[in-house]
């Protein structure tokens, strides 16, 4: 087996590296060191490029069609990266998508005012302002809502195994309150 020189790089873990769309990097603090995984900048640019391409090819499409095209892409990308440390990245993507949709809406109605465009395409939904959608209830999902629904997992101490009978109390205490893993 031979490694490809163009694809293989040796880097220090504090500099970080990209793998499967994630940037993995270790940060050292005075008290401890933390290894974080975040969506890579290349993956973010690719997503935003895809969304921009959809909006530019559908300049005259209805808002319903835009929501139908964008929601699966946003949901799929968000679900892939939801278990990483992506809060800042998701917030950035939400902001960029909003800017692209605002430009799309202003371009569609050049003779209308910005307030008219705001109330036509960006209503208030469930107390949240500036949600892109239509009057019939089709709304664009937010990446931040995907991140908010993700579950954080507590690290397993040492070499503990759920199959070790001596650690039955440890695993019972760990899964208490979590119905998903109650059958262990």
Image: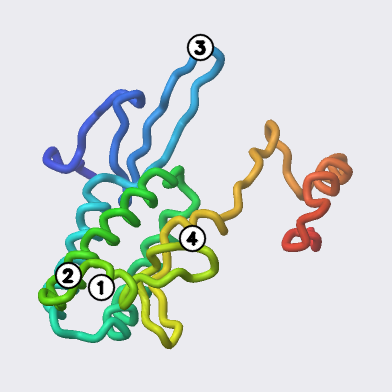
For the residues marked 4 and 3, what is the alpha-carbon distance in whole angstroms?
A: 32 Å
Tally of marks: 4
For the residues marked 3 and 1, what is the alpha-carbon distance in whole angstroms?
A: 51 Å
Element at label 2:
helix
For the residues marked 3 and 2, what is the alpha-carbon distance in whole angstroms?
A: 50 Å
Q: Could you tell me residue 128's position as x and y percent? A: 48, 62
Q: Could you tell me residue 79's position as x and y percent? A: 45, 62
For the residues marked 1 and 2, what is the alpha-carbon distance in whole angstroms?
A: 7 Å
Q: Of the numbered discs in the image, which one, if any, rests on residue 117?
A: 1
Quarter of the image where one finds residue 52: bottom left
Q: Nearer the viewer, residue 29 or 54?
A: 54
Please give the name of the residue rendered at 54% of the width and 18% of the height, measured from the top-left corner: 32
Query: Neighbour class for label 4 at 10 Å: few (<14), some, many (≥20)?
Result: some
Query: Neighbour class for label 1 at 10 Å: few (<14), some, many (≥20)?
Result: some
Q: Of the numbered discs in the image, which one, if any, rests on residue 146?
A: 4
Residue underneath mark 2: 106
In front of the other: label 3 or label 1? 1
Q: Is residue 100 left or right of residue 129?
A: left
Q: Of the numbered discs in the image, which one, if any, rests on residue 41?
A: none
Of labels 1 and 2, earlier in sequence is 2
Q: Which quadrant does the C terminus fall into?
A: bottom right
Element at label 1:
helix
Of labels 2 and 4, earlier in sequence is 2
Q: Nearer the viewer, residue 107 or 71?
A: 107
Q: Is residue 63 above or below residue 29?
A: below
- Work out which residue is located at the far top of the displayed protein and give it: 30
């Amino acid at each position: 087996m031979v490694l490809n020189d163009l694809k293989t790089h040796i880097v220090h873990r504090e500099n970080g590296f990209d793998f499967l769309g994630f940037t993995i990097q270790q940060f050292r603090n005075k008290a401890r060191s933390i290894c974080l995984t975040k969506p890579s900048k290349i993956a973010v640019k690719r997503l935003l490029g895809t969304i921009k391409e959809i909006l530019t090819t559908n300049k005259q499409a209805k808002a319903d069609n835009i929501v139908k095209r964008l929601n699966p892409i946003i949901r799929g990308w968000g679900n892939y990266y939801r278990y990483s440390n992506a809060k800042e990245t998701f917030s950035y993507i939400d902001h960029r998508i909003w800017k692209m949709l605002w430009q799309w809406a202003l371009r569609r109605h050049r003779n209308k005012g910005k307030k008219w465009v705001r109330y036509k395409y960006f209503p208030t939904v469930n107390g949240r302002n500036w949600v892109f959608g239509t009057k019939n209830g089709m709304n664009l999902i937010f990446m931040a809502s995907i991140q908010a629904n993700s579950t954080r997992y507590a690290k397993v101490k040492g070499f503990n195994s759920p199959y070790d009978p001596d650690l039955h109390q440890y695993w019972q205490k760990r899964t208490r309150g979590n119905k998903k893993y109650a059958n262990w």
